[in-house]
Amino acid sequence: MIPQSLRSALSALLGETAFPDNPSLLTDQRRRFTGRADIIVMPDSTAQIQKLMRFCTEHRIPVTPQGGNTGLCGAAVPDGGVLLNLSKLNRIRTISTADNSITVEAGAVLQNVQNAARRVGRLFPLSLASEGSCQIGGNIACNAGGLNVLRYGSMRDLVLGLEVVLPDGTLVSHLEPLHKNTTGYDLRHLFIGSEGTLGIMTAATLKLFALPQTTATAWVGLDSIEAATALLSAVQSRFAERLCSFELVSRFALDLSSAFSGIRQPVEAQWHVLIELSDSLPDSNLDALLADFLMENHMENSVIAQSETERQQLWTLRENISAAQRKLGTSIKHDIATPIERVAEFVNNCGRDLQRQYPGIEIVVFGHLGDGSLHYNTFFADVLDNDVYRFEDAVNAAVYRHVLACGGTIAAEHGIGMIKNHWLPEVRSEAEITLMRAVKTHLDPHNIMNPGKLLP
Ligand SMILES: Cc1cc2nc3c(=O)[nH]c(=O)nc-3n(C[C@H](O)[C@H](O)[C@H](O)COP(=O)(O)OP(=O)(O)OC[C@H]3O[C@@H](n4cnc5c(N)ncnc54)[C@H](O)[C@@H]3O)c2cc1C
């Protein structure tokens, strides 16, 4: 269908207000890919999305769902057809302190959901540096992880129910806040992590938790990753579920972030960890307990935040690593995970290998050591623009070889999108990929849902 007749057909279905004039939505947030779309559509109701999907199936028009467009794998970049942006479908539908649940529309921005929960004295624990713009639908479609997975799990663990529009317009809805429901196949898990390839998530019921009343935040300098993983194990033994975050930061990552933020480095060391504990009791004396623990474990090279301002500064150093890297230039990025006890082996072996192949390569290592996932980004000092992508296949091959040798995964929390789908057969068996294709073909027989993403 030519764009003009598509526009008038969709105006008749959705009304004139559903078409934003915003070509920047065609480019991903890393500005690596710019796609093309015959039309960009921003509906504001599930019913409109049902109509749209019926129409697109009938006319075999590809549809790319898009949330906050903060994804890092090019998964929300369209290749023709309809770019379906969910931003206007953003209401908080219900919230229940009795059920510890909140039901929100897919386009609700993560931070707005966190704030809505906080207003009723509850915590929605998913937390990412992009939380001011990423959306719940995108978080579900990517099975987002972030800073609190250690204690609360990733998005998959936080979804109680889903409302989904299938490619043919059928609505599948289970939004009841049931914490138990054993009635056959749990279909919500098919859509979580599906990267917009099976249907459009339009709403979700999410788990809430008691709001923490006290936190204790420490920054610790260490000589090695081995020391960091030993510390993680000791902190878990002592503080159990009170441990929320255990973030690893390499010296180079901290140098970049500290220069970018203008915040002094808390301690001098080769490796750093940011530890945060929280408790729902107001008088749990966590600071003192954490200080005693660090002294007992000979962690003198450490600081504990003495105020909310100091805590924010420590977190700013951690959170600004991505922005500081962006200022430095383009890098080849990896979102990997290994079993925690093999993280050091991976970082040491892979670093040695890359240095041998590319003398002078700079590697920024940071991430969620508490759940074994790391951001592993490589910079070539003399190629700091997108031209660096000519090394991408070779660098990926080296990095992923070490990841797989350590029993890890090439996509911990950002997904596969269009940059890693040719690597999928390395991490999923032929039988698994055949099964995934069978599910995809059944739900989306005309392959209109986000074609070219996820599956090779
Ligand atoms: C600075 C920064 C820090 C980040 N930190 C983290 C982190 O710590 N942990 C982490 O997990 N991620 C992180 N991310 C990545 C990103 O923010 C997450 O992947 C996020 O979940 C994507 O949400 P989004 O709304 O922006 O989705 P988009 O980028 O818009 O889309 C991502 C995918 O979801 C699909 N999709 C979106 N909405 C829907 C819907 N309603 N129905 C069906 N499919 C849909 C799209 O088609 C696409 O495949 C970070 C990104 C940035 C820029």
Image: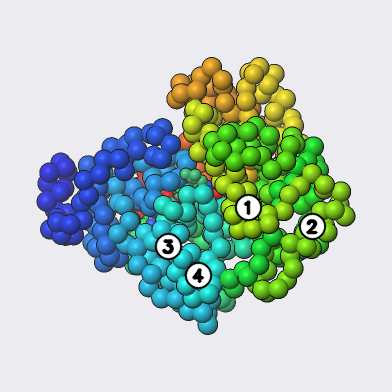
Location of residue 39 by image quarter: top left
Q: Earlier in the sequence, mark 4 or mark 1?
A: 4
Question: Disc 2 designates what residue?
Answer: 291
**Is 183 on the left or on the right of 285, as rendered?**
left
**Is 379 on the left or on the right of 406, as rendered?**
left
How many other residues sit within 10 Å of disc 4, few (<14), some (14-19) or many (≥20)? some
Q: How many numbered markers are drawn?
A: 4
Element under disc 3: helix
Alpha-carbon distance for marks 4 and 1? 22 Å
* Residue drawn at 68 percent across, 54 percent down: 305
| Image location of residue 235, percent across then percent down | 78, 57
Amino acid type at mark 3 = Asn
Marks 2,4: beta carbons within 8 A: no
Marks 4,1: beta carbons within 8 A: no
Amino acid type at mark 1 = Glu
Q: Earlier in the sequence, mark 3 or mark 1?
A: 3
